[in-house]
Amino acid sequence: MSRLTYQDMMAEVGEHIALHDAHGYSQTNREGDGTVEHLTFSDGTPYKIHGGDYDCSEDMRMCVAAVGLVPWGYWDSYMWTENEDEVLTSHGFIRLPFDWGSTQRGDILWVKGHTGIALGNGLQADAHGDEYGGITGPNQGDQTGHEIEVRDLQWYWTWTYRYVGPQRPEPEPAPPTPVQVPGDARCQDLVIGYRAHVQRAGWLPSVRDGQTAGTEGFAARLEALKIAPPEGVVLDAMVHEQGVGDVWFRGIKAGPRSGTGSSDIDPIIGTVGESRRIEGIEIDVVEWPKSLKGKWLWYQVHLQGIGWCDPVRAGTFAGTRGESRRLEAVRIWIE
């Protein structure tokens, strides 16, 4: 649903106050009863009004304040019929001679001593008297259903105040969900598996042997990794975390795994649920079996604003410190 215009929002506020008997007429108690009523416009936008009673000008002030065109607090945008022109015309409204046939939904209506709001379709909402036809409102709330009400558009108005200022901008579209494109593995048989946790996407599918874990082109930070090394290999890993610095994760070794993925019991390297980027990584070899003699552990990182950096061997820091630059993807392999 598109965002409502300010005119439609003001009309919805006026309708709500008029149609809910918790709000009656009173000049004496027009500031409300000290409570706040939290509501939602038809487009889902939240808003608030004060509880208790209103008179006509406070009713209109709240229509304008609830949508954010004037400050919400009572004394911050105090308005009554004698200063209404000044308040409205200094906040995006123009004054027009009242014409019944050209009145639009959301127009504020004024005649000396009274004010209301046009709802469209030949209707208006206004607060026009307490249960005794007076102005003091001794009993809170609408005792008759007519203290504040929706009724036919009246003919006696002198001026129409129409909002012509800027509208709320449409919300920015949600960024796309990051998509991982693993690419080809460097060997046919699983040697080392790993998995990335990425901003807006969570845990992505496991990859192996030089495939890409993470994303490119989505401006999504790498937040955590799992690594499942081959049998007999034990690793330590360090990540440089946003706002924390270097954090070590010790004793990473092979565990049960399914397919080519790292297992659920692998330690989580980094953080999940803290919105914290990894800025650099170092992987150290603690144990290396004879079957891998002559081979090395390699890794490569994709950095914000830089792209893929040169591969480095185990024991080398890859990434940055002090640049607030996120890692976006990583590749790990043995050769």
Image (cartoon, grey):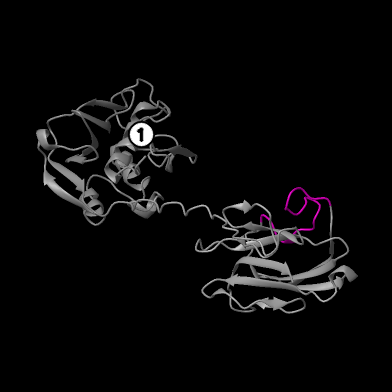
Q: Secondary structure at mark 1?
A: loop
Q: Residues within 10 Å of mark 1 (few under 14, many from 20)?
A: many
Name the spot of residue 309 as percent of width and height, x first. Answer: 60, 76
Lateral position of residue 297 relative to residue 172, left or right: right
Res. 289 in view: no
User: Measured along the vertical axis of the image, is residue 307 above or below residue 270?
Assistant: below
The spot of residue 48 in percent (x, y) is 44, 42
Left/right of residue 169 with respect to residue 162 in the rendered view: right
Which amino acid does the dot numbered 1 rest on?
Ser
Q: Position of residue 94 (x, y in %)?
A: 17, 51
Q: Nearer the viewer, residue 33 or 2?
A: 2
Is residue 268 covered in magenta? yes
User: Residues in magenta?
Assistant: 256-273
Quick check: can you spot residue 23? yes
Q: For residue 136: magenta?
A: no
Residue 98 sits in quarter: top left
Helix, strand or loop: magenta stretch: loop
Q: Residue at x 75, y 58 (%)?
A: 190
According to the picture, the residue beneath numbered tag 1 turns out to be 26
Instruction: Judge whether 274 appears above or below 99 on screen.
Output: below
Residue drawn where x is 38% and y is 54% of the image = 76
Number of numbered discs visible in the structure rendering: 1
